[in-house]
Structure formats: C-alpha cells, structure tokens
Image: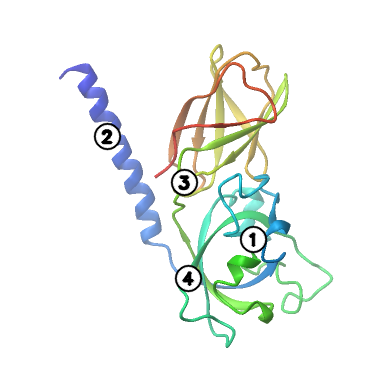
Amino acid sequence: MDQSLYRKCLVILLAMAMFGTSTAYYRGSVWRRGSATFYGDETASATMGGACGYGNLWDSGYGAATTALSTVLFNDGYSCGQCFQIRCVSSPNCYYRSPATVVTATNICPPNWGQNSNNGGWCNPPRAHFDLAKPAFMKIANWKAGIVPVSYRRVACRRMGGIRFKFEGNGYWLLVYVMNVGGAGDIKSMAVKGSRTNWINMSHNWGASYQAFSSLYGQSLSFRVTSYTTRQTIYAWNAAPASWSAGKTYKSRANFS
C-alpha cells in the first residue's frame, strides 16, 4: 500500500476509535439526584473567573451556561470543563415544560462548615450540588425558590473550534490554562514539546491549568492532552509560535469529539 494512503487510513481509523470511546461513555450516562442553587445576577458577571481559571467566560466560549460544583463533584479541579445536563424535579418551582439545560463546570462551590448540609451548607460533602449562574438556573426553575432538587447526568461537550491555551508564567515556568475542550471536556494530564526539546510532562497546578518548569522561550510549542474521563489523547501540533508570550491565548485546530 502507498505510504501516504496508509497514513491517511490510520488517521481515519484512529479518529473512529476515539469517537467510539467518547460516544460509548455518554450512552451509558445515568441520571442522578442532586440539588441546585444560583449565584450572581442575570448578567452572570459574578461568575466570571472562577477556580478553573477560565477568566472571562464570554471570551473563553462558555458564556452564562456555567456552574460551580460542590467539593465531591469538583474532584480537585479534574472536573473543570465537564458538561452536565440538569433538570429541575419534585418542586412546584420547576419549569417542567422547559427542556433540561446543559452547563459547563467552571468553578468550585466550597463547603460551608458553619451550616448544616441540609440547611445552608449545600456544597458540603458528600452532597452533589450545582451552584448555577443565575441565567442557567432561570431556565429550569423560578429563581425565587433559591434551591431546588435536580436530576443530572454527564453529557458530551459540544465546542466550536479547537482547544485554547492561555499562557502565563516566565522564562523558566510555563503555566497554561486549557479552555474550550470538547468531548469529555476535562483533562487528566498534559505534556509540552518545544521545537528544540522532547516531550516534557506538565504537572497539574489547579483547576484547568498545567505547568512546566522549563525554559521554552523562542520555541514553537506543541501539546499532548489526555482526557480524565475517556483517557483519549490528542496532539495540538505547533499550537503556539516561537514568538509566544505570557498573557496571550493561542488556538489549536485539535479537539476531542
């Protein structure tokens, strides 16, 4: 077989295998019970930033369809970027005619140890709780309810465009915030490769950020990203040019299905 044709077939088969892994996982996703509150107002301005490190959520592509997760669901930041389908249940405040809404995890709802778990300490372990942006909450229930019981399940994240990498750090420390991840939406591990280096494993900093303690200035950078949920791995080749700098965001065509 012609080598170029062989490589093309290999790429197609690999993509099919990855897609099958992703869809199989979500096909078995079951509805679970939890609860939901909201924070901020209708503008969702109070939800900007957050523990995942996405910054301005409008610029990052997430908008107001977001949620903070209780400690159990947040999973030390490995749940950042995951997508959840949520519907209000068993409450007169539910909008039953409205479809379930899909939100992305962008923040943590910390425990409130001074309050009972069933009376104010909604995000205390082991509760599965969603603190939604107010516009997202208003899609499933009357906001005056304050808190409602919900059913939720994981769903695939549908993202437009490729993964985005926001750079911070300095000449000897590269910190990368990873955004707009499709498929499972989450990240288990990352590695970076400079145009003059081999692959360098990056350590998890917090939320959706990963770091490498290496001098990589003046090199174009590629990334290897592995999903926490599906263990799929993709390569974002030459995601950042040799002229990259801290404070800028770079886009790749690569993304999970």
* Quarter residue 47 falls in: bottom right
Q: Helix, strand, or loop for circle 4?
A: loop
Task: Using the image, tell me which numbered label, if any, was put on residue 182.
Answer: 3
SS assignment at label 2: helix
Disc nearer the start of the sequence (4/3) = 4
Q: Quadrant of residue 6?
A: top left
The alpha-carbon separation of the residues under discs 1 and 2 comes to 36 Å
Q: CA distance from mark 3 to mark 2?
A: 19 Å
Side of 88 relative to 119 (left or right): left
Name the amino acid, label 4.
Ala
Which numbered dot is residue 69?
A: 1
Q: Residues within 10 Å of mark 1 (few under 14, many from 20)?
A: many
Residue under the image location 60 percent in, 70 percent down = 137
| Disc 1 and disc 2 in contact, CB within 8 angstroms | no
Q: Position of residue 198 (x, y in %)?
A: 53, 17
Percent from the top left, x then y, of residue 245? 67, 23
Sequence-first tag of 3 and 1: 1
The kind of residue on which mark 2 rests is: Ile
Q: Residue at x 55, y 71 (%)?
A: 139
- Is tag 4's residue or tag 2's residue first in the polypeptide sequence? 2
- How far is mark 4 from mark 2, CA to CA? 34 Å
For label 2, count other residues whose C-alpha is less than 10 Å away and answer few (under 14), some (14-19) or many (20+). few
Q: Which residue is mark 2?
A: 12
Label 3's element? loop
Q: Amino acid at mark 3?
A: Gly
Q: How is the image coloured?
A: rainbow
> Callout 3: few (<14), some (14-19), or many (20+) C-alpha neighbours within 10 Å?
many
CA gap, disc 4 to disc 3? 20 Å
Disc number lying in front (1 or 4): 4
Please, which residue is most extreme toward the bottom here?
92
Point out which mark residue 100 bears.
Answer: 4
- The residue mark sitting in front, 3 or 1, is 3
